[in-house]
Image (tube, rainbow, N blue to C red):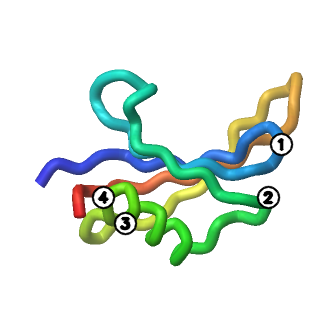
């Protein structure tokens, strides 16, 4: 089964956005935004993926990374492999 990459990214104001990176235009990627600045829980991320029509791929897990830009602050990113639900 085809898998895609889901990314959870923290925006410049601290809010979180989840998106599934699909082939084609970025504007067409399924996206869900979370209110507040707290990191969304695993269950909140799973629910958001379900609303978008996806689920974690078998054996997949969330991995975290930092993108530090010396001109700004640290940006937290999380990612995992997903497949259509």
Q: Which residue bears the numbered disc 4?
A: 53
Residue at mark 2 to residue at mark 4: CA–CA distance: 24 Å
Number of dots carrying numbers: 4
The mark that comes first in sequence, 2 or 4, is 2
**What residue sits 88% from the left and 23% below the top?**
71
Q: Which residue is mark 2?
A: 37
* Residue 32 rendering spot, x and y as whole percentages: 53, 51
The residue identified by callout 1 is 13
For residue 12, which quarter of the picture? top right
Position of the N terminus, as image quadrant, is bottom left
Question: In the rendered structure, are the residues bearing label 3 and label 4 in contact, judged by CB atoms less than 8 Å apart?
Answer: yes
Q: Measuring 34% from the left and 65% from the top, which residue is drawn there?
A: 56
> Does dot 2 land on a helix, a strand or a loop?
loop
Label 1: how many residues lie within 10 Å, few (<14), some (14-19) or many (20+)? few
Quadrant where the image shows the C terminus: bottom left
- How far apart are the alpha carbons under marks 3 and 2? 21 Å
């Amino acid at each position: 089964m085809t898998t895609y990459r889901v990314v959870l990214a923290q925006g410049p104001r601290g809010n979180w956005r989840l998106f599934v990176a699909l082939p084609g235009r970025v504007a067409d990627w399924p996206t869900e935004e979370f209110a507040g600045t707290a990191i969304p829980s695993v269950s909140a991320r799973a629910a958001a993926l379900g609303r978008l029509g996806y689920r974690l791929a078998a054996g997949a897990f969330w991995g975290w990374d930092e993108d530090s830009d010396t001109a700004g602050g640290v940006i937290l990113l999380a990612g995992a492999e997903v497949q259509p639900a």
